[in-house]
Amino acid sequence: PCDLKTALKELIPERKQEMLKIKQECSDVKVGDITVGSVIGGMRGNRSIFWQGTSLDSQEGIRFQGKNIKECQACLPKDPQSSDSSDNFLPESMLWLLMTGKVPTEKQASNLSSELAYRGAHLPDYTTKIMENLPPDMHPMTQLAIGLASMNKSSRFARKYEQGLLGKNDYWEYTLDDALQLIASLPKLTGLIYSNIVSNGEPLGQYNENRDWSYNISSLLGMTTGDSINRHNLTDQQAKDFVNLMRLYMGIHVDHEGGNVSAHTTHLVGSALGDPFLSYSSGIMGLAGPLHGLAAQEVVKFLIEMNSELSSNMPESEIADYLWKLLNSKRVVPGYGHAVLRKPDPRFTAMLDFAKARPAEFKTDRNVALMQKLSEIAPKVLIKHGKTKNPYPNVDSASGILFYHYGIKELLFFTVIFGCSRSMGPMTQLVWDRIYGLPIERPKSLDMNSLKALCHL
Ligand code: CMX
């Protein structure tokens, strides 16, 4: 089948059967023990969420339907219009992989890309109006959450459910429909937010129904040479590289298994049968926290500030001293550490490789040079410091500074770009939640007296 819905329809009977068998025969199988430490420690190590598309290995990093980033780069289809073998795969290909567990053919990927481009061409007029009237200095993530939440008015799932027209077996089709509509709407929403911030709402580029999702995001940010006003006078090569940076970034930030704040929030809100727009606007609010998606912005601030204090050759000793000062004042090193991962984040490595592959472009960028140097020096300092369980760079270490390089300098806005990509994993899960008919999430909580009793205190 060439379209996603039909491909899913073919997969569903077998997968549902699998789930039913597990439910009927294995519901009593123990997964692990829950400790008091995990109850008061952010549920760390507590394996209790079912998540279909990705899983995170503490040593190897993320796997998308079992494939690591390099494998995805080798097998996922690229933009059919691209002639360059170094171009990155389309995030749309990744969405197909997440949803179906199968690598799409070029035709399947380009059909999905065209479907999203078609669906994304028109936002509901009330959403556009709301977005155009938001204060430019409102947090970009609040703007994004408002835009997405407003689209709940056009949710096909919510409407049918309210009319009492949906049987449980039909939930997934309407959820898929909404999920694709949501993902498709992100380029325009992102463009509206960015132009609200930087150009008094004047559009920075054009939406092109014949181009892929990442190209349209780049165009609406004013970062292409063909369809946009090219605010930063990018050369054709730079604009092409930016679109590829966008494809790379968007393709690998889609999901990081189920327990992270944005994914888990989406899943939790969705478990109450909230439609995709309500669920993901909540996830976006989770992504906005400084310990999660906002860290990309913190990293850029941090690199710029540090750069301004270092001598021109950036000696290791000065960088280490700077880090110690930070740690001694009880602050964290942004872009380092992770709740689960215990090695350098392969998403960081992929972003760093993007810069390394373009030495001429980045050779005079001190921020990018510092980002790279820091990735060698900070782990040594953090290991000596002895607290952080993972002293290595995480995903947010490199992404923001690369966007900054090409001219996206509005730091608070970076998380909106993250939010575009992150839609794909949680939306995939929501569709499968509906396919399997998973129930509302409702863990049991413990009060202090119960904790004390458990601890014999
Ligand atoms: N710099 C300094 N200290 C750090 C640190 C860092 N980068 N990362 C962790 N620590 C400290 C913690 O603050 C904690 O100290 P206390 O015991 O005094 O509270 C100790 O090390 C142990 O923490 P941990 O178990 O290693 O890390 P957590 O699972 O609690 O937190 C994370 C993970 C990402 C929030 C944390 O490493 C951090 O704050 N990093 C900096 C912010 C950042 O880069 N966030 C982006 C994460 C990626 C994402 O999800 O988007």
Image (cartoon, rainbow, N blue to C red):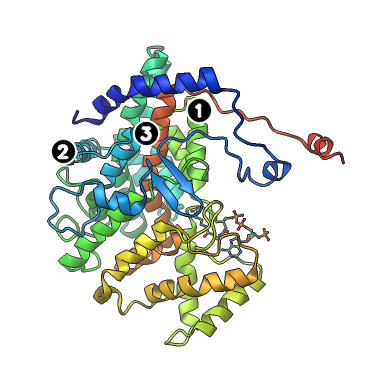
Residue 265 versus residue 326 in the image, above or below: above
Q: Tell me whether circle 2 and circle 3 mark residues in contact (CB < 8 Å).
A: no
Question: Cα distance, mark 3 to mark 1?
Answer: 19 Å
Marks 1 and 3: in contact by CB < 8 Å?
Answer: no
Q: Quadrant of ligand 1?
A: bottom right
Q: Which numbered disc covers residue 107?
A: 2
Residue 453 on image: x %, y %: 84, 35
Looking at numbered disc 3 in the image, what kind of residue is underneath it? Met
| Badge 3: residue crowd in 10 Å (few <14, some 14–19, many ≥20) | many
Mark nearer the viewer, 2 or 3? 2
Where residue 371 sits in the image (x, y, percent)? 43, 71
**Picture layout, residue 241 above or below residue 116:** below
Q: Mark 1 is on which residue type? A: Ser
Q: Is mark 3 within 8 Å of ligand 1?
A: no
Residue at the spot 34% in from the left edge and 22% down from the top edge: 12
| Mark identifier at residue 271 | 1
Name the residue tied to disc 3. Answer: 151
Instruction: Give the SS element for disc 2.
Output: helix
Looking at the picture, tell me which residue is in the foreground, 330 or 308: 330
Residue 457: name its quadrant: top right
